[in-house]
Amino acid sequence: MRRHAFLTVVVIVLASLWSGCGSARRGEPIAGPMVIASPEIKQGQQAFMKHCHQCHPGGEAGLGPALNNKPLPQFLMRFQVRQGFGAMPAFSEQEINDEDLDHLLAYLKALKSHG
Amino acid sequence: MRLLRHSRRPWVIGSALLLLLGHLAGCFSSRSPDGGSQAKFTLPRHINADDVALPSGYRIDAVATGLTFPTGVAFDREGRVYVTEAGYSYGEVWDIPRLVRINADGSMAVVAVGENNGPWTGVAFHEGTFYVAEGGALRGGRILRITPEGAVTPLVENLPSMGDHQTNGPVMGSDGWLYFGVGTFTNAGVAGEDNVKFGWLGRFPYHHDIPCRDVTLTGENFRSGNPLTPNDDDTMLTGAFVPLGTTTSQGQKIRGQTPCSGAIMRVRPNGDEPELLAWGFRNPFGLAFSPDGRLFVTDNSYDDRGSRPVHGTGDLLWEVRSGHWYGWPDFHGTRLLNDGDHFVPPGKPRPGLLLSKHPGIPPSPVAVLDVHSSSDGFDFSRNPAFGHVGQAFIAQFGDQSPTSGKVLAPVGFKVVRVDVRTGVIEEFAANKGRQNGPASKIGGGGFERPIAARFDPTGSALYVVDFGVMTLGQGGKVRQPWTSSQVAAEPRKGTGVLWRITKPMQ
């Protein structure tokens, strides 16, 4: 069981390094229009625009690293949003409540798989 | 496998998790800056519209090339196209400001020329007359009235815009007022070594930001090297809203006046005294009215540079409301700059507040655009045939990293559209490729630095003014007055392009 967990971590790290080679571009001119039917994901999109887009424009690299081409486990993303890491600031529940964070992560998942 | 059974296993797993998290975080501090300006370029500029990606159904054409530092576009009653050439660019490159007509075959005819007081940053046409915003790098900003025959008359003069940012706009409202913006002298309220690099501090060592209303200071002063002496060990203290090397004290009042820094003003075309509309902006560059008559502005936000660097502040799209204060130099949007770790540059101190009492709480921005994108001139779609009616199409000049602050990848260099009801930003026109960036960096013949976007009078064509190639030299180092005249920004004359985006009938 523990061996399995260790191997899983190694696989995730390798997959992460490998997937970083893929393009992060998901904008409409490159990947086509992204149709969002779910109200929750639309809500997540607006939360992303308010809090994340400025450093990760459209999920691509900018001030910060790209998000679209990395297999970010949701628990790590949630951890990073709440705690901050490196140059990324922490966002408290007063800034992004748990429900909005759920929607934001759902939007990011949809964005990553778009195109 | 033996290791797995060893007592150090949690350390191994923890290290792997940290490695993963570090990779995901992008290791901002350990990575080199990779801005769009960090490219090598040799003339001539290659132009190929096929290298610009657009949504399905749209097409783009280069309608004029060979422009020098173009900044704005306007249309006369007959729908003919006119472009301003700035006559000045960051990098202290001077040329002659011009208003030129773009003929149908792409040739140009000069309508008017300006003096050595550029940059001309934009143009509007109203009832047979052109109105041009003159940045005023040498003698202060002006709003110029220009007849179709080329006669130039100042409408407004002596605007305090000889610093990092200039006089911008203008745009004519349906109320008969001409609206324009005045940028701040400095990045964040404190003069310093970074302003030497822009060139102006050597010319005007006693200039500083001017508040539009009385403000009271916290009295924080900032230590920097003394850029006016050759001694590396020579340092000085400088406070807010005062000249370089001048200190301030807690409770000190700075008298407000107009015209002032970081403001949106308006004037009647007949030449009455201009009046203040709103203040607390940093560099209010693009101005446009929405189809329902509301005024919006793009505001270039703080850089990570100078004596009071600020990290991670995206450019803002505001709706402009009369009498409001919009937060500079202590807010980004509705958030104070000393709030948590949001604006702390890596390895530098948290920016302290400059004002002991704020003139108000800024309204919420309409949209938060990319950090260092230099989101500039824009317009609203009005024609259903083009699509996205009511949305703002914004030209993004692109980053000037590392001078303005470090980025991990090029930012901007494209046109985005913004739904002003929701703040959702969508890419609209950008260079093709695995990575975004200017053609001089990523290859191809597409965009360099879009600086203005404006629809023609029919609303069926979006014209995009592309300033041309501007790389950065000297690795972003500050130029001292006694060193060679080579400076950081390297704009290339004759590389500007006017693009036109249309949506042909299917």
Image (spheres, helix red, strand yellow):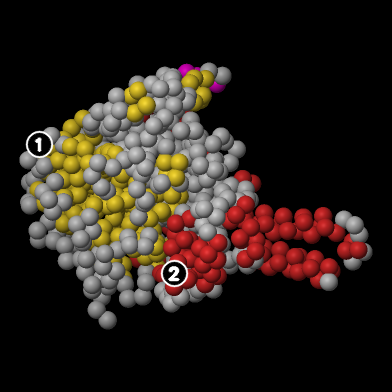
Q: For this rendering, which residue is in front, B260 or B154? A: B260
| Label 1: few (<14), some (14–19) or many (≥20) C-alpha neighbours in 10 Å | few
Chain of the residue under the numbered disc 1 shown in the image:
B
Q: Which residues are magenta?
A: B228-232
Q: Secondary structure at mark 2?
A: helix
| Label 2: few (<14), some (14–19) or many (≥20) C-alpha neighbours in 10 Å | some
Write down the residue under mark 2. A42
In space, the residues marked 2 and 1 are separated at their CA atoms by: 48 Å
Quarter of the image containing the C terminus of chain B? bottom left
A99 lies left or right of B451: right
Q: For this rendering, which residue is in front, B131 or B493? A: B131
Residue B230 within the magenta-colored segment of the rendering: yes
Q: Which residue is pictured at 30% across the width and 28% down the height? A: B214
Can you say whether B235 is above or below B10 in the image? above
Q: Residue flagged by tag 1: what amino acid is it?
A: Asp
Q: Which residue is pictured at 42% across the width and 37% down the height? A: B330
Identify the main secondary structure in magenta. Answer: loop
**Is residue A105 visible from the viewing direction of this image?**
yes
Quarter of the image containing the N terminus of chain B? bottom right
Residue B232 position, x and y percent, is: 55, 21
Q: For this rendering, which residue is in front, B296 or B396? A: B296
Q: Which residue is pictured at 34% across the width and 39% down the height? A: B360
Q: Which mark is residue A40?
A: none
B47 lies left or right of B227: left
Q: Secondary structure at mark 1?
A: loop
Write down the residue under mark 1. B272
B401 lies left or right of B277: right
Q: Are marks 2 and 1 on the same chain?
A: no
